[in-house]
Image (cartoon, coloured by chain):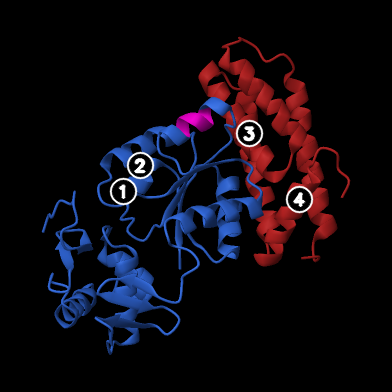
Amino acid sequence: MINIGLIEDDPIHRALVTVTLERANFGVVSFGSAHEFNRRSVGDIDLILLDWQLPGESGIDFLRTLRAGETSTRMPVIFLTGHGEEERVVEALHAGADDYVVKPARQAELVARVEAVLRRIGLSDVPPEVDFAPFRFRPEQRDVLLHGQPMALSSREYDLLWFLFQRSGRIVGRETLLRQVWRIGPEVNTRTVDTHISRLRKRLGLGGESGWKLTAIYHHGYRLLRVGSEGIQETA
Amino acid sequence: MSEPCLERERLAEIASLDAFRPGFRDRLIGLFQAAVEQHLPLCVGDVETSAVQRQQAAHSLKGAAAGIGAVQLAALAHQLEQIAKTSAPTWPNPSALTLAAAEATAALRAWSAANSGVS
C-alpha cells in the first residue's frame, strides 16, 4: 500500500483529505505540525501532502529543510493550502514542491494529482516486472528472481524484501516494518524483524555480494543501498 | 438542497465520503461547529486580540468554512483576513460574520437532518 503523510493542522481538511485518499486505497498518516512529522520515523511515507500555514515551522520552511537534507532519495511533496496566490505557488515550486493544490481540494483532482506524482517516481501502477538488477520482482506472482533464477521465499520474506527494495536508499525503522509488513504494532519484539533481515541478507547476498547492501542503522532501522551509491553516509 | 449559503458541489462530495465512511458527514459538521466556536470570537472582537491573531483566526475560519462548503462565511472570513493583514484596528461589520456563521451552522444541521438515513 502507498502511504501518504499528511501535514495539516486544520481538523476539517485533515478529515476530508484522509477519507478521500483512503477511499482511493491509499494509507494516510496525519501530522498536526512539521515538528510532529520530524519526531516520528517516516520510512513508510511515500509522499507528503503539506499545508503552508502550520503551527511552529511553516510548510515552506519545512520543505526547504527537507530538500536541503536529502541525499540519495527525494521525497515527493505536494502543497495543499488555502493560499492560491501566484507568488505563493511559484515560491513553493521553486522550493522543491512537486505540485500545488489549492484548498478545498476537489476529491477526484486531489487523487489524480497524487497518482500523477507517484507515477513520476515509479510508485504507482506496478508493472508486471520490476527490475532491481540482478533482482527482478514479479509483484503479481509475488516472487523474485536473482540472476534469472526464482528464489524460494516465504510470503513474509517476499513482502519484506519488496518493501525494502521499493524504499531503497531510505532508512526504514523496525516499527515501520512491523506495522507495514507484519501488520502488527511495536509491542511485539522487534527481534523477529532482525531475524528475517539476517536470513534474507545471507540467502540473497545482501551484504554487498549481489550488488545490494542491507545495512543496520543504529537506533533507526535498516537501509538498502545499491553498492557504490553516491552521496550516502554509512552510519552503521 | 437549495441553501444559498452552502456550496452544492462540496456537499455532494461530503455526502459521497459519508457513503464510504458512515457518520463522516456529522463528524465534519461537529468539527465545523467547534471551529466556529474557537475562531469566531477572535474574528469579531469579542476577545481582545492582536492583528496577527485576528488574521490567523480569520484564516482558520475561512479554511473551515471553505472545507465544508459554507461559501458566504468563507468569503467574509477571507475579507477579514485581508483587512487584518493591513493591521486595521477594527473589523467594519462583525455582525455580518456572526450572522453568516449562524446561517451556515443552521443550514448544515438542516441538510444533515434531511439526509440522515440517505447514505
Residue drawn 18% across the image and 81% down it:
A199
State whether discs 1 and 4 lie on one chain: no
Q: Amino acid at mark 2?
A: His
Q: In the rendered image of this protein, which colour is used for chain B? A: red
Mark on residue A35?
2
Q: Toward the viewer: B82 or A224? A: A224
Residue A165 percent location from the top left of the image: 30, 68
Q: Are marks 2 and 1 in contact (CB under 8 Å)?
A: yes
Res A10 → quadrant: top right
Residue A43 percent location from the top left of the image: 32, 58
Query: Residue under mark 1: which chain is it in?
Result: A
The mark lying in front, picked from 4 and 3, is: 4
Q: Relative to A161, is A115 on the left or the right?
A: right
Q: Amino acid at mark 4?
A: Leu
State whether discs 4 and 3 lie on one chain: yes
Mark on residue A39?
1
Q: Relative to A82, is A204 on the left or the right?
A: left
Quickly name the residue at label 3. B61
